Image (cartoon, grey):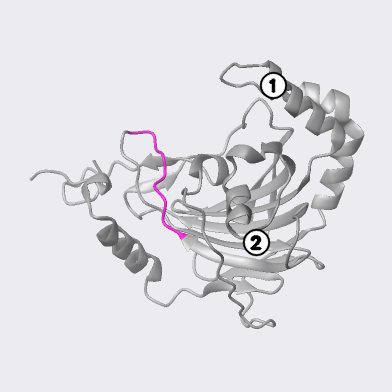
């Protein structure tokens, strides 16, 4: 029997497969409130966002996920975005994403050390999960969330500082909670100069250079970021009413490698599976 791949399946069928698998034996509760993102089931997560950050919008996408093979499976990308104001420029915001790969055929690649610009990479445990914590600069020009804000008529800075918490409660499920602020002047200067003067494939300054010139600003940002999220398990009952605020989506799909991660194929050895 010829093996089938996700790359050969119609997109609508793939999405139906993912939705059916995600539902399991009981409906999966997932959504946003004014100050939280929640999802029951295996994800078992309730992430509260500290006011005055409140829900600015939420949405869903079904992007392809680059993998360790020449096949890119479709995944889910459910998100909530939180910021201070309902209009005008955005100089800080938080987002939460839950993303799922097709079960039994794919899993998330382990999160190891990031790019040469990653300012922090450490681990912690809480709310029944192991979290990877990273801090990094983000260039807005190629960032999907900058495109999301632009599609909704909001202005954003050219450079961010970001601190991210991510967990993989199951091989196919990943949670990401990230807080960003407009990069401080010293970081902006370093990034802008590097992009202007260095035409290499990876033109940004390395993390040791960014730390050396901007240590006080980075530490101050990191301390503020630590107060943004309260990572909890899903409670038996929500204390806040579910709230949905659909956003206008950008044309491009989320950059899954940068925002969530890469996929790995699971070799089941079963010809009837959806793996290659």
Q: Name above or below for residue 151 compared with residue 34.
A: above
Q: Secondary structure at mark 1?
A: helix
* Badge number at residue 119: none
Identify the residue shown where x is 71% and y is 36%. 137
What segment is highlighted magenta in the picture? 61-69
Residue 236, percent from left and from top: 61, 80
Q: Is residue 201 above or below residue 139?
A: above
Q: Which mark is residue 81?
A: 2
Could you tell whether 214 is left or right of 180 in the image?
Answer: right
Q: Nearer the viewer, residue 156 or 94?
A: 156
18 with respect to 4 (left or right): right
Is 21 on the left-hand or right-hand side of 225?
left
Residue 55 among those drawn in magenta: no
Residue 43 appears in view? no
The reply to whether residue 175 is in sight is yes
Residue that numbered label 1 is attached to: 196
Q: Quadrant of residue 119?
A: top right
Mark 1 vs mark 2, foreground winner is 1
Was residue 64 drawn as part of the magenta stretch in this picture?
yes
Residue at position x 51%, y 75% in the image: 29
Instruction: Provide the major secondary structure of the magenta segment.
Output: loop
Please, which residue is most extreme toward the left here?
Answer: 1
Label 2 SS: strand
The percent position of residue 184, horizontal first and vertical second, equals: 84, 39
25 w.r.t. 74: above or below: below
Distance in Å between CA atoms under marks 1 and 2:
31 Å
């Amino acid at each position: 029997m010829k093996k089938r791949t996700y790359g050969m399946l119609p997109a609508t069928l793939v999405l139906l497969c993912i939705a059916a698998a995600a539902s399991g034996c009981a409906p999966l509760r997932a959504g946003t409130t004014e100050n939280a993102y929640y999802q029951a089931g295996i994800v078992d997560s309730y992430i509260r966002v500290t006011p005055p950050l409140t829900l600015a919008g939420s949405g869903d996408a079904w992007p392809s996920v680059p993998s360790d093979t020449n096949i890119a499976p479709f995944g889910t990308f459910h998100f909530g975005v939180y910021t201070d104001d309902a209009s005008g420029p955005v100089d800080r915001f938080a987002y939460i994403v839950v993303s799922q790969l097709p079960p039994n055929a794919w899993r998330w690649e382990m999160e190891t050390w990031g790019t040469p610009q990653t300012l922090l990479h450490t681990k912690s445990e809480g709310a029944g999960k192991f979290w990877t914590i990273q801090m990094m600069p983000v260039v807005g020009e190629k960032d999907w969330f900058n495109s999301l804000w632009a599609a909704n008529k909001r202005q954003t800075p050219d450079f961010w500082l970001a601190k991210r918490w991510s967990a993989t409660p199951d091989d196919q499920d990943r949670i990401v909670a990230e807080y960003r602020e407009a990069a401080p002047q010293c970081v902006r200067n370093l990034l802008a100069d590097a992009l202007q003067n260095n035409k290499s494939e990876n033109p940004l300054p390395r993390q040791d250079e960014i730390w050396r010139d901007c240590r006080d600003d980075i530490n101050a940002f990191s301390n503020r970021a630590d107060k943004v999220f309260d990572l909890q398990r899903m409670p038996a009952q929500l204390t806040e009413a579910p709230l949905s605020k659909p956003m206008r989506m950008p044309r491009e799909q989320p950059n899954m490698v940068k925002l969530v991660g890469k996929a790995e194929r699971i070799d089941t050895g079963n010809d009837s599976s959806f793996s290659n």
